[in-house]
Amino acid sequence: MGGRRSHQLMPQIVAVCGMPGSGKGEFASVLGKEGIPVVSMGDMVRAEVTRREVVESPGIFGEVAADLRAEYGEDVLAVRLADHVDELLQNHDMVLIEGLRGTAERTLFAQRWGSKFSTVAIVADEEHRFARIQNRGRSEDGDYASFLIRDKREIGWGLDALILEADASIMNNDDLNGFLGACDAWLASR
């Protein structure tokens, strides 16, 4: 299924969740290559860090996300993203929201889109996730202590519940080709 709207299918909004380093970005790449628009909640936080002119460091992205949530509500990123997703749905059968991290976000999306909304969890063990984070070289990634702090913060937002309660799960503890094949299989099942 391509990203262009066929007018025969009910539009779908899919949000992908997973712990840091689980493979959400790779999942998004698979869908993006099929013409499905991807909107990233993490990119919204990165843009806010830039807007605030804060020096990028491993902890700053989480701090800014926590500040936004404290100031505007736990669903702030979802609120800011929802209208853009609706615009994309005018011309596409599916839109992917990358980086769902909190139950408040899921609640807002589920209330807004009902049965058109679903979640996919990317699941990987801690060892694989940390190795991936060390290899990708993003400014928000740090040492093992930073990794554990980030995990704890995101679990505090309800990420563990999102993963357990997701509509579908894709395991990502094997090689990249195996994971990409699992992503393709999931997409073909839609």
Image (cartoon, rainbow, N blue to C red):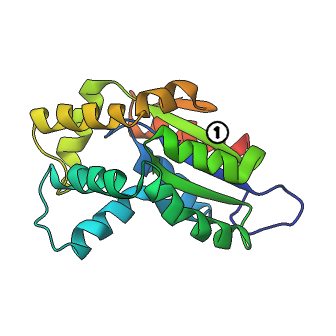
| Residue 101 in sight from this viewpoint | yes
- Front residue of 129/150: it is 150
- Front residue of 48/18: it is 48
Quadrant of the snapshot with the C terminus: top right
Q: Is residue 106 above or below residue 40?
A: above
Residue drawn at point x = 24 percent, y = 49 percent = 62
Residue drawn at point x = 64 percent, y = 39 percent = 186
- Front residue of 96/177: it is 96
Quadrant of the snapshot with the N terminus: bottom right
Residue drawn at point x = 35 percent, y = 31 percent = 155
Q: Which residue is mark 1?
A: 186
Q: How many marks?
A: 1
Q: Position of residue 12 (x, y in %)?
A: 72, 53
Which secondary structure lies at badge 1?
helix
Q: Is residue 122 above or below residue 106?
A: above
Q: Position of residue 149 (x, y in %)?
A: 18, 34
**Would residue 70 appear left or right of 50 to someone viewing this image?**
right
- Front residue of 154/172: it is 154
Residue drawn at point x = 42 percent, y = 48 percent = 74
Q: Residue furthest right?
A: 8
| Residue 29 in sight from this viewpoint | no
Q: Position of residue 146 (x, y in %)?
A: 14, 38
**Would residue 94 appear left or right of 65 to someone viewing this image?**
right
Crowdedness near tag 1: few (<14), some (14–19) or many (≥20) residues, C-alpha within 10 Å:
some
Q: Quadrant of residue 34?
A: bottom right
Q: Position of residue 2 (x, y in %)?
A: 70, 62
Mark 1: amino acid: Trp
